[in-house]
Amino acid sequence: MLKKIIIILFLSAAALTGIAYTAVNDVKSGAESYNRQHPILASPISTGDASLFTDGKTLIRSLYKDIEEAQSFIYIHFFIIRDDAVSKEFFALLQKKAEQGVDVKLSVDAIGGNDITKLMIRELEKSGAQFANSRPLSYQHFFYRLNHRNHRKIAVIDGRLSYIGGFNIGEEYLGNDPRFGYWRDYHVRLTGSGSEEITKQFLKDWKEDTGKTIQPPISKTHSTGSDRYQFVFSTGDDLEKKLIGMIHNAKSSIMIATPYFIPTDELMKSLLASLKRGVKIELLIPDKPDYWYTKPPSYPRTKKLLENGAVIYLYRKGFFHGKVMVIDDYVADIGTANWDKRSLFINDEANCFFYSKSFIAETKKELRKDFSSSRILTEDMYDQIPFWEKMLERTPEWIYELF
């Protein structure tokens, strides 16, 4: 009997190893093929008005108001849309606008939108709106297609204003889920010619997901604001290179806030090099993550930064989901990309770089609020990490890359 159990365990381990090897290689080859055809795209620098939102309820009111006032088209993509009260309200508003003759296109990631029911989609399409599951699964490069997600959260209305950031559509993003409590995130509303770039990217994704080519609608945009900004749409390691370049250019300070901090070796090298040349680095991460398994792999990295002089804040007011970086008083980066290999090498992401001192100052002010809602990480705290978490510190990269 014991011999049979040993044989079964051995065969099971061999099978799992084979599946893991196949999955890792499929993801790698699929990503290399896809990324070659989808190089990083940096838009021209635009001028307009940028409004920063860090609270989901305030953001949703603004987005709903802009949707209500839409005259020509509404193009929206979210990574996650739930089947709950706020999501149904969102769908009802889009249906109303479609019935008024507005061109409504809603895209949601095929995995992130898994909660959406067929009835919700049917009712939406009955009103004349169009719906697409973004990055659907396929047998070709199955493991890559499973992991390759459209992580962007973008919206454009009439080509005159747009949204980009970390919020999705669901009750937890309004702070209504007791598991998370208050939800802290960063999202931006933009006016100006940059909305044309969001329109182009949305329709590019739409074509990839549906096979339908649609010419961007003609819209009259007015660059009346004073905020200068630039979009970066990425899939692949070019985003890592761009971040490293920004870090190397830092002269006095780097502020980073992210829900997941598992940077690549190259990013770690650039951060440590900045510390050695006297740049102050402040990092904010959640005290309690939404997925427990994302925390242990970050321990060796945060400890190394701490030992070299970085200040690390653990956000405690609720859950922190923002993706923010500020370099000196030169640039603020707000978008959808996390500090992990999934965002840097696999997902479709959208970031916005801001070059206006007033907006950068506002972003810094909000980050300072987040720092004040945190506790500071100390080296003594590493001694308090549970044994089982320490065992997971050296989790093989392929595991947290895929899961």
Image (cartoon, rainbow, N blue to C red):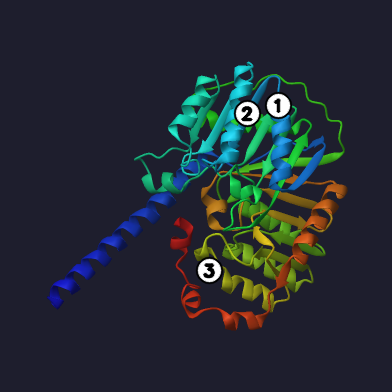
In percent of the image, x 87 and y 38: which residue is there? 226
Name the kind of residue labelled 3 in the image. Pro
Nearest to the eye among marks 3 and 1: give it. Answer: 1
Which quadrant of the structure image shows residue 320? bottom right
Residue density around tag 1, few if under 14, some if 14–19, many if 20 or more, within 10 Å: few
Q: Is residue 34 left or right of residue 370?
A: left
User: On residue 385, which mark appears?
Assistant: none
Q: Residue 191: percent from the left, percent from the top? A: 78, 33
Quick one: quadrant of the C terminus?
A: bottom left
Which tag is nearer the camera, tag 2 or tag 3? 2
Q: Residue at x 19, y 74 (%)?
A: 6
Taking 200 as reference, is 126 left or right? Answer: left
The residue wearing badge 2 is 93
Q: Residue furthest left?
A: 1
* Numbered label attached to residue 297: 3
**Which residue does the image show at 24% across and 64% down from the upper left?**
12
Q: Is residue 350 visible?
A: yes
Identify residue type, mark 2. Answer: Leu
* Residue 27 percent location from the top left of the image: 42, 51
Residue 68 tag number: 1
Q: Secondary structure at mark 3?
A: helix
Badge 3: residue crowd in 10 Å (few <14, some 14–19, many ≥20): many
Rounded to the nearest angstrom, the CA distance separating label 1 from label 2 is: 8 Å
Of callouts 3 and 1, the N-terminal one:
1
The answer to whether residue 146 is left or right of residue 157 is: left
